[in-house]
């Protein structure tokens, strides 16, 4: 039964060829036979051979299906990464990933990341250490390569504000919740979301809060086509389905987790699972973290080392 379901799914990828056309051919053959029987009736009956057409068509479809599914020697040298110009899954991410203690800070007073340079926050800002924490790269990408921030901003933030660096995300959220620190940036939003639901006075800044914009990242929505895959054609069939409207609608919901709604790049799929304040907006300044020119974080780590060394 499972095999039959898989075969049905395979053929439903191309509904025109495997569903619509066979029905169209059958309907046309029926109409031709009906017209002949009505206009040119014969007492002994006539054989038109109309059904042969559908047999020939199905034979051709079967041959095409075999060539698509069976392994071939052709090698595909390129991988297929997610990019800003494709329709791949692209989860939303909130800029530099800033969070705050809700009892100690009014978010309405901070409309730009530059506002965190306010002297009253000196010694009250916590940051994840990009040199030690895996998975903290995207907000650091945003901070370092964003044209409105960049090295100039990082030099002032880490050079003037006595920022505390940590590699322990749980400890970072505990410190933020107890009021030891007022702002944490960058920090993983999912960790803050869990702490907020447990009653700690912490929250993230809303996605479109800061004027420097929002970043977009493929993150868990990445996929690649291996250049020596045993069944490259079958893999391409799957990828084509994943990029389809049905595939993207299902995929974005399947990988969504509480507090982190995943949003497909496609605009023709349902977005009802995404909170209104996380929906993508027109004419918004988006920072593409999949741009290969912004992927290298070594300059950011080198800059951080330089800043901290200058403070000793």
Image: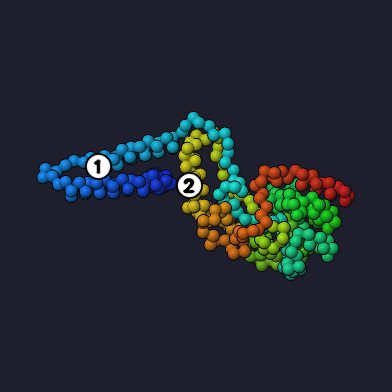
Expressed as whole percent of the image width and height from the top left, the position of residue 51 reads: 25, 42
Q: Residue furthest left?
A: 43
Number of on-image labels: 2
Expressed as whole percent of the image width and height from the top left, the position of residue 216 reads: 64, 53
Q: Residue furthest front?
A: 39
- Label 1: few (<14), some or many (≥20) within 10 Å? some
Residue situated in front as seen by the camera: 297 or 134: 297
Residue situated in front as seen by the camera: 6 or 198: 6
Q: Earlier in the sequence, mark 1 or mark 2?
A: 1
Location of residue 309 with respect to 157 vertically, above or below: above
* Left or right of 69, for residue 27: left
Does residue 178 appear in the picture of this structure? no
Q: Residue furthest top?
A: 73
Expressed as whole percent of the image width and height from the top left, the position of residue 221 reads: 58, 49
| Residue for point 50% across, 48% down | 242
Question: Which coloring applies here?
Answer: rainbow
- Label 2: few (<14), some or many (≥20) within 10 Å? some
Write down the quadrant of residue 258 in the picture: bottom right
* Left or right of 2, for residue 186: right
| Residue for point 11% across, 43% down | 44
Callout 1 touching callout 2 (CB < 8 Å): no
| Residue for point 77% across, 44% down | 299
The CA distance from mark 1 to mark 2 is 34 Å
Expressed as whole percent of the image width and height from the top left, the position of residue 133 reads: 72, 49
| Residue for point 67% across, 43% down | 292
Q: Nearer the viewer, mark 1 or mark 2?
A: 1
Does residue 28 appear in the picture of this structure? yes
Q: Secondary structure at mark 1?
A: loop
Q: Which residue is mark 2?
A: 241
Q: Which residue is mark 1?
A: 50
Residue 83's tag is none
């Amino acid at each position: 039964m499972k095999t039959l379901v898989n075969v049905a799914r395979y053929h439903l990828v191309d509904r025109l060829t495997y569903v619509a056309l066979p029905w169209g051919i059958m309907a046309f053959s029926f109409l031709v036979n009906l017209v002949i029987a009505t206009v040119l009736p014969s007492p002994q009956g006539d054989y038109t051979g109309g059904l042969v057409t559908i047999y020939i068509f199905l034979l051709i479809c079967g041959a095409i299906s075999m060539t698509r599914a069976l392994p071939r020697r052709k090698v595909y040298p390129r991988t297929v990464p997610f990019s800003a110009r494709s329709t791949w899954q692209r989860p939303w991410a909130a800029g530099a990933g800033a969070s705050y203690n809700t009892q100690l800070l009014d978010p309405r007073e901070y409309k730009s990341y530059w506002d965190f340079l306010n002297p009253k926050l000196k010694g009250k800002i916590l940051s994840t250490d990009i040199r030690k924490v895996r998975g903290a790269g995207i907000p650091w990408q945003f901070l370092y390569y964003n044209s409105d921030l960049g090295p100039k901003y990082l030099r002032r933030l880490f050079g003037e504000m006595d920022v505390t660096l940590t590699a322990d995300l749980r400890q970072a959220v505990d410190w933020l919740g107890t009021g030891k620190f007022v702002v944490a940036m960058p920090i993983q939003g999912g960790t803050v979301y869990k702490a907020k639901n447990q009653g700690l006075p912490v929250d993230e800044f809303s996605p479109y809060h800061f004027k420097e914009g929002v970043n977009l990242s493929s993150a868990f929505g990445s996929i690649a086509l291996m250049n020596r895959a045993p069944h490259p054609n079958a893999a391409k069939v799957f990828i084509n389905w994943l990029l389809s409207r049905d595939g993207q609608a299902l995929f974005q919901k399947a990988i969504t987790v509480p507090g982190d709604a995943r949003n497909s790049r496609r605009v023709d799929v349902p977005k009802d699972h995404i909170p209104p304040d996380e929906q993508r907006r027109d004419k918004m300044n988006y920072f593409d973290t999949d741009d290969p020119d912004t992927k290298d974080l070594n300059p950011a780590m080198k800059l951080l080392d330089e800043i901290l060394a200058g403070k000793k």
